[in-house]
Image: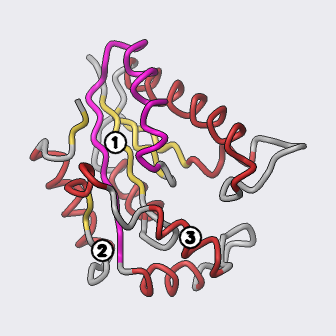
Amino acid sequence: MDGQLIVLTGPPGAGKSTIARKLAATFDRAVHLHTDDFWHYIVSGGLPPFLPESDTQNHTVLDVIAGAACTYAEGGFAVIVDGIVGPWMLPHFDRARANHGHPRCDYIVLRPTRGIALERAQQRTATDALVDETPILSLWDQFSDLGDLEQHVIDTSRHRPDDTLLAVLDAVSSGRFRLR
């Protein structure tokens, strides 16, 4: 049985990791791929992924993430990819899906308002958490106008985590957020 991919994305502070963990727990067989982990696998020579000069590195990492996600999906798992995956990175998933039987893929952007995203991101306490205002707001700005993919946005500004989880489950079951 083929699995499916759910790319859960948005700016820092949107609630991606919290919701990804909860979402994965709703499936009988699931994998949660936290994309930040893949950047941490680079032990030397890595650049912070939000810097413009990290573009080549970021494309390499996204190829690895997309390949791993599609391999798990091909094995029958629901795969929740949790991270900052802008529309400009979706071709990595398109190529990987083509090589793995085109598993279903939902693209869901969690996007609170700019101020709420900054506030939430700066409240994080993990030692490696991105809390600097400039990159947080820059990343939010990159998700502010998604063109044709704007219909894939869920505004999480007023949501508690359980509200967001219900909205994501509804989005997945409706098929409205599916990529072709």
Q: Earlier in the sequence, mark 1 or mark 3?
A: 1
Is residue 141 positioned above or below 46 on the image? Answer: below
Q: Kindly identify which residue carries mark 2.
A: 156
**The residue under label 3 is which amino acid type?**
Ser
Q: Which mark is residue 54?
A: none
**The residue under label 1 is which amino acid type?**
Ile
Residue count near mark 3 (Cα–Cα under 10 Å), binned few <14, some 14–19, many ≥20:
some
Residue at image coords 39%, 37%: 79
Determine the CA span between mark 2 and mark 1.
Answer: 17 Å
Is residue 24 positioned above or below 158 on the image? Answer: above
Residue count near mark 1 (Cα–Cα under 10 Å), binned few <14, some 14–19, many ≥20:
many
Is residue 171 positioned above or below 1 on the image? Answer: below
**Where does the magenta region start and end?**
86-112
Q: Kindly identify which residue carries mark 1.
A: 6
Task: Determine contact: label 1, label 3, CB under 8 Å.
Answer: no
Residue that extends furthest to the left in the rendered view of this protein? 174
Residue at image coords 45%, 21%: 96
Query: Between residues 86 and 17, which one lies in front from this camera angle?
Result: 86
* Mark in the foreground, 1 or 3: 3
Q: Earlier in the sequence, mark 2 or mark 1?
A: 1
Residue at image coords 26%, 29%: 104
Q: Kindly identify which residue carries mark 3.
A: 138
Mark 2 secondary-structure assignment? loop
Q: Is residue 115 left or right of residue 50?
A: left
